[in-house]
Image (spheres, rainbow, N blue to C red):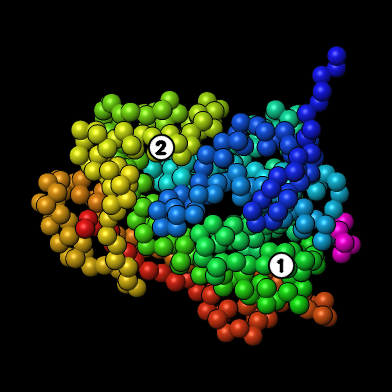
Amino acid sequence: MKKKKPNKLKILNDPIYGFIQIPNSLIFDIIEHPYFQRLRRIAQMGLSNLVYPGANHTRFHHALGCIHLMEKAVRVLRFKQIEISKDEENAVYIAILLHDIGHGAFSHALEHSIVSGISHEEISLKFMKKLNEEFDGELDLAINIFEGNYHRKFLCQLISSQLDIDRLDYLKRDSFYTGVTEGNISSDRLIAMMNVKDDELVIEQKGIYSAEKFLIARRLMYWQVYLHKTGLVAENMLVNVLKRAKELAEKGVELYASTALNYFLYNKINQDNFTEETLEMFSKLDDYDVLSAIKEWVHHQDKVLSLLSKMIVDRKLLRIEIQNKPFAKTYINKKKNKFSKKLEISELDIDYFIFSQEIRNLAYQTDKPIYILNKKGKLKDIAKASDQLNLQALTKPVIKHFICYPK
């Protein structure tokens, strides 16, 4: 009896867009690959669910939403007589599907603690190249577009620009799962208004208000969600837990950890020694490894590690103050002296509990403009084309400073 071939043209149900169709069997095989399936175990928004209980959606979810929006964008541009070949179409689907594949556990926390000097974009590229070997070079063009090297600029802009498919999905998705309605943009309308002029991805004049709303929504989502004060505390505490664990591991202290996490704790990993073995280990590391370790570290004899871990597990987080100017050195030192005595933690280690940093929110970068295509076929930067005075204001970074310390 002949073996039945699996049906690779699956339909998935997405809470935001309804039914999503997988475009072809190659994409299906990439989605089925263990590298991609790992994204099911990585939260899209790190520890934001400590603030917004509904924010439990994953990178897997987001990547599938992106491919759905990319299909719409290709359809719209072709309808407007922009030529996109079958190979180019497939390449942008693969590039957007894999744009986040290099994210570590809890998204950004890993980049700043146990893996240093290599960004998630660089790791994404390593994964794509490895998959390309397995799929006999079928990802060549996708990699070229992902790196921004393809001669048709607008295809690269669909993957990465100030109005790319990635942002169109994550703003809408994060807004949906957090319940923060300010982020609810009309991605359909924005895609319907897309066009290409002089190889630039542009928005037609009648879509200007949707594009303005998109920029303002992004700014509001940053302050209300991505840079929410409790989320900031939680993410920094997570980074500090991993940093402390790494510090102890370097001294040879025994720590409970899964095989994958153990590898990254007990080896110095940076850009120069990120080998194929490292990539393989990285592909096995996800939120579950980190969380299960932190739950065990609550009982570790190292006071700093156990206290930080317990605070995260029980959601008894540090206090945070935010202001427009940097905190005075004297104020920070006063806090350090007070809590060093109170918690009986050395002055050297108190930095894990008391720290000050800055946050910046730049809603619109003028060096990568969003162009509006007017009725006469001329291009104008949205900041100049808009009658919204706020848009000019969005081009200046807003910088705030925060300090965290125990309650």
- Front residue of 160/260: it is 260
Q: Which residue is mark 1?
A: 190
Residue located 38% across and 34% down the image: 292
Q: CA distance from mark 1 to mark 2?
A: 38 Å
Instruction: Look at the picture and state if 154 lies above or below 91.
Output: below
**Apparent side of residue 153 relative to residue 257 in the rendered image (left or right):** right
Residue at 46% across, 49% down: 46
- Contact between labelled residues 2 and 1, with CB atoms less than 8 Å apart: no
Drawn side of residue 214 relative to residue 51, left or right: right
Residue kind at label 2, given as amino acid type: Val
Marks 1 and 2, the one that precedes in the sequence: 1
Vertical placement of residue 179 versus 145, above or below: below
Prevailing secondary structure of the magenta residues? loop
Q: Nearer the viewer, residue 112 or 367?
A: 112
- Given the current orientation, which residue lies at the most extreme top position? 1
Element at label 1: helix
193 is higher (above) or lower (below) than 302: below
Q: Secondary structure at mark 2?
A: helix
Q: Residue at x 33, y 60 (%)?
A: 357
Q: In the rendered structure, which amino acid carries the disc numbered 1? A: Leu
Q: Magenta stretch?
A: 78-83
